[in-house]
Amino acid sequence: AKADGRGVFRFFERQMDEAVQRKQALKAGLRGALDRAELELRYQPLIGVEQGGITCFEALMRWRHPHLGMVPPAEFIPVAEESGFITGMGEWALATACREAASWPAPLRLAVNLSPVQFRRPGLVRAVAMALSDSGLMPERLELEITESVLLGEEEANLAILRQLRDLGVRIALDDFGTGFSSLGYLLRFPFDKIKIDRSFVHGLPDREDAKAIVRAITGMGRGLGISVTAEGVETPGQLGALRKKGCSEAQGYLFSPPVPASEIPALFKRLRPS
Ligand code: C2E
Ligand code: CA
Ligand code: CA
Ligand code: CA
């Protein structure tokens, strides 16, 4: 039994070593990833729940590592945030996506994620303004997605940045709504244009009473506050039906399309026409 225990211990030790090594490899690789053009963007459509048709695309970052293959953002974004690389990567994503979106037919919108780390660096507002002016994308067609963690800490300073972004004419969306500690409080502090219901709530639709109650509460609140409500992670027609009944305005998920390269956008337009 003793030998077994040691074996198990060694096993975990090796696993931890591997995890630490992988993280170090990712960190080292991320340093030049942008310059080596290893970063790519995928675009996932948002669909109008009532009328159908694409209303917006969310840009999502991908990293094609030369040896490790595609590294998922859930793994490399935290590393990029720790090392500070996320600022340059995020600015690249913003500029690239705006250039892409400038050729889409109006009033189609573009959504871009902002990391809390990126948010706290000086120069964010300038970078957004530059991405808009360089691309010619109308500000009202750009939506910046933030999570409530952006507002943690120096709340007044962060609210001031949100107001400056808003003054540029862009829309601000509160992402992963309902998963944090104080999502509701933030709705009183800043007039968000949109909230995105986290997919953990959508998952329980259409059958679970608790999920239905939560989604009903969020859409009701959105209506009361004049904030549009999007659901993410929509995978089944049953979930879409429940969201429609609750008055959700947009839906996003594998039911319609996974995130795709920009070259596949024209085909998506044909397939996902308004009804
Ligand atoms: P997020 O902003 O909540 O993005 C939605 C995630 O859900 C995406 O994962 C998307 O591919 C995935 N998804 C979409 N539809 C479905 C569905 O029907 N079912 C399921 N199970 N998942 C679905 P992805 O692309 O792996 O990105 C993960 C997270 O990484 C994002 O979550 C976001 O927080 C972060 N991220 C991605 N790109 C960027 C970026 O350019 N900048 C920053 N700061 N963060 C990013
Ligand atoms: Ca998002
Ligand atoms: Ca989200
Ligand atoms: Ca999420």
Image (tube, grey):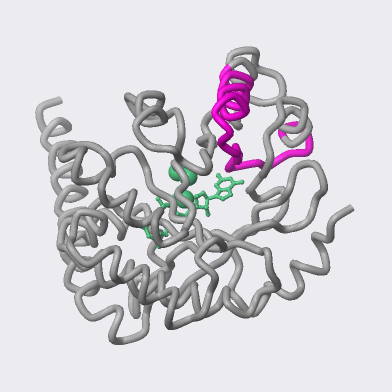
Q: Residue at x 41, y 24 (%)?
A: 184
Query: Does the magenta-highlighted stretch encompass residue 245?
Result: no
**From the viewer's perspective, is residue 223 above or below residue 72?**
above
Which of 41 and 121 lies nearest the eye of the viewer? 121
- Taking the view exactly as shown, the residue that stands out farthest to the bottom is 36
Q: Residue at x 13, y 45 (%)?
A: 13
Is 82 left or right of 262, judged from the image as shown?
Answer: left
Which of 192 and 90 lies nearest the eye of the viewer? 192
Residue 93 location (% of width, % of height):
40, 71
Residue 154 location (% of width, % of height):
16, 40
**From the viewer's perspective, is residue 114 above or below residue 123?**
above
Is 137 left or right of 254, judged from the image as shown?
Answer: left
Which of 130 and 62 lies nearest the eye of the viewer? 130
Is 197 left or right of 87, judged from the image as shown?
Answer: right
Q: Residue at x 46, y 59 (%)?
A: 169
Q: Residue 144 appears in which quarter of the rendering? A: bottom left
Q: Which residues are magenta?
A: 214-239
Query: Does the magenta-highlighted stretch encompass residue 236?
Result: yes
- Taking the view exactly as shown, the residue that stands out farthest to the right is 275
Is 194 left or right of 163, judged from the image as shown?
Answer: right
Q: Residue at x 28, y 39 (%)?
A: 149
Residue 156 location (% of width, % of height):
20, 39
